[in-house]
Amino acid sequence: MAIRVTLTYSSYVARNIASSAAARVGAGDVSYLFRRPEVSDIVIFKAPPVLVEHGYNSTDVFIKRIVASEGDWVEVCDGKLLVNDSVQVEDFVLEPMDYEMEPMFVPEGYVFVLGDNRNKSFDSHNWGPLPIKNIIGRSMFRYWPPSKVSDTIHHHEQVMQKGAVDVS
């Protein structure tokens, strides 16, 4: 008896709110059937209720990086991201954050997401934690623009340094 599992990938034009360029990524629709979203995952998600209340459509799709998960405390101080009072090493971020954010608790059933272009991203530091139920999938690879073709999955043992994240 043979069992066949078909994995599907979807292509999304996921936009970074307040960004001039759209990234095109392949997303794994079934990824979270087998595991929960984790810190460092780049996730594709539908607009959370707070954005819908401010005029976005509930079917709008966005892409951000998970930087903290339920039960974590997140803050931005002196241009650095702190999760549970630990400074995160983020070599992929081009410049220090030019904003401050008071400590914010990530409740059960939520994650905290930030765009990699931190100073131009409209994300959890503006509108709060993202409900996990809004996540459609995670980015598996980037195929546009052609000069940036790469996978977007990184393994924790390669990128984590005491809670630090590093995903393209």
Image (tube, rainbow, N blue to C red):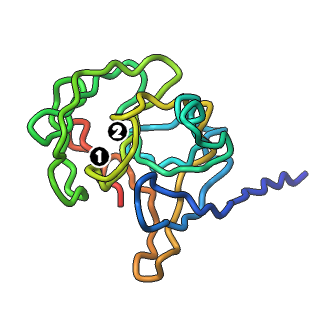
Give the residue at mark 2: 67
Q: Considering only order in the chain, which callout, 2 or 1, is on the residue closer to the N terminus?
A: 2
Task: Count the labels in the image.
Answer: 2
Q: Is residue 28 above or below residue 122?
A: below
Q: Position of residue 27 (x, y in %)?
A: 60, 57
User: Which of 38 and 62 lies nearest the eye of the viewer?
Assistant: 62
Mark 2: which amino acid? Val
- As drawn, the label of residue 76 is none
Q: Quadrant of residue 87?
A: top left
Mark 1: which amino acid? Val
The reply, left or right, for residue 135 in relation to residue 7 is left
Q: Quadrant of residue 161?
A: top left
Q: Distance from label 1 to label 2 (Cα)?
A: 7 Å
- At horizontal 44% and vertical 46% (from top left) the residue drawn is 41
State which mark lies toward you, 1 or 2: 2
Q: Position of residue 96 (x, y in %)?
A: 15, 50
Look at the numbered discs 1 and 2 and tell me whether their residues touch, using CB distance below 8 Å. yes
Q: Quadrant of residue 24?
A: bottom right
Q: Is residue 34 above or below residue 43?
A: above
User: Which of 155 and 49 lies nearest the eye of the viewer?
Assistant: 49
The reply, left or right, for residue 130 in relation to residue 163 is right
Q: Position of residue 149 (x, y in %)?
A: 46, 76
- At horizontal 59% and vertical 42% (from top left) the residue drawn is 56
- As drawn, the label of residue 165 is 1
